[in-house]
Image (cartoon, grey):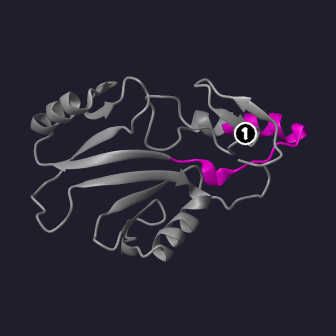
Amino acid sequence: MSGNAPRWRDDRGREQDRTHQAAALPPHGQYYGLPERHIVLAGQISAAARPLDIAADPSAVQSEQVTVDALSGAEVVPFWRALLGYRGHANSAEDLVDPGGRGAPFFVQRMEAPRPWRNRVHVDVWVPYDQAEARIAAALAASGRLVSDADAPSNRVPADPEGHEACVGVTGPPEPATGRP
């Protein structure tokens, strides 16, 4: 948070400053990137913030999920639901969310065949399109390695030094940053 920015308390009572995020985070229960309506809302927030001289911080925008690869989601989902105390999300048999909105969502991703040579639980991190390169570069500079960029620029797979993988997906339009909030 910025040192001299005006302070306020969010809906959970946490102290915040007036630095806003250039893209609105999705409301609880909506994940996997930003829908178009959130991008429109982000533009409206930026327009309202601009005359107040409130700085944008697009690097602060991200959402995460934990993904469990499974041959049979129908067998795996009940275990994670019970263990975490989560509930199903919308009409999806594969998505689990924390009813209190505190924990990361879980997604059970169907595998076609076993992959014993590869980890089967990983974290998905969704960032704005114009922040993905910097996020990947930071992970690689912190002793990571790039496992795959076959789906770049929309998705890249870095791994830590022990081979634990993550997926870095992008949200928003594939446009360069304008530098404006």
**Spot occupied by residue 76 in the image (x, y as percentages of width and height):** 14, 38
Q: Is residue 1 left or right of residue 99?
A: right
Closest to the observer, 124 or 5: 5
Give the total number of marks visible in the rendering: 1
Q: Is residue 159 above or below residue 172?
A: below
Chief secondary structure of the magenta portion: helix
**Spot occupied by residue 5 in the image (x, y as percentages of width and height):** 81, 43
Q: Is residue 81 left or right of residue 52?
A: left
The kind of residue tagged 1 is Gly
Q: Is residue 21 left or right of residue 181?
A: left
Q: Is residue 136 above or below residue 100?
A: below
**Spot occupied by residue 122 in the image (x, y as percentages of width and height):** 30, 55
Local packing at callout 1 (Cα closer than 10 Å; few below 14, some 14-19, many 20+) is some
Region of the chain picked out in magenta, as a range? 42-62
Q: Give the residue number, with chain letter if any, for mark 1.
A: 43
Q: Residue at x 49, y 65 (%)?
A: 153
- SS for callout 1: helix
Q: Residue at x 11, y 64 (%)?
A: 116
Q: Residue at x 59, y 60 (%)?
A: 131
Q: Is residue 144 above or below residue 79?
A: below
Magenta stretch: includes residue 50: yes
Q: Residue at x 77, y 38 (%)?
A: 18
**Spot occupied by residue 56 in the image (x, y as percentages of width and height):** 74, 48
Closest to the observer, 4 or 105: 4
Magenta stretch: includes residue 6: no
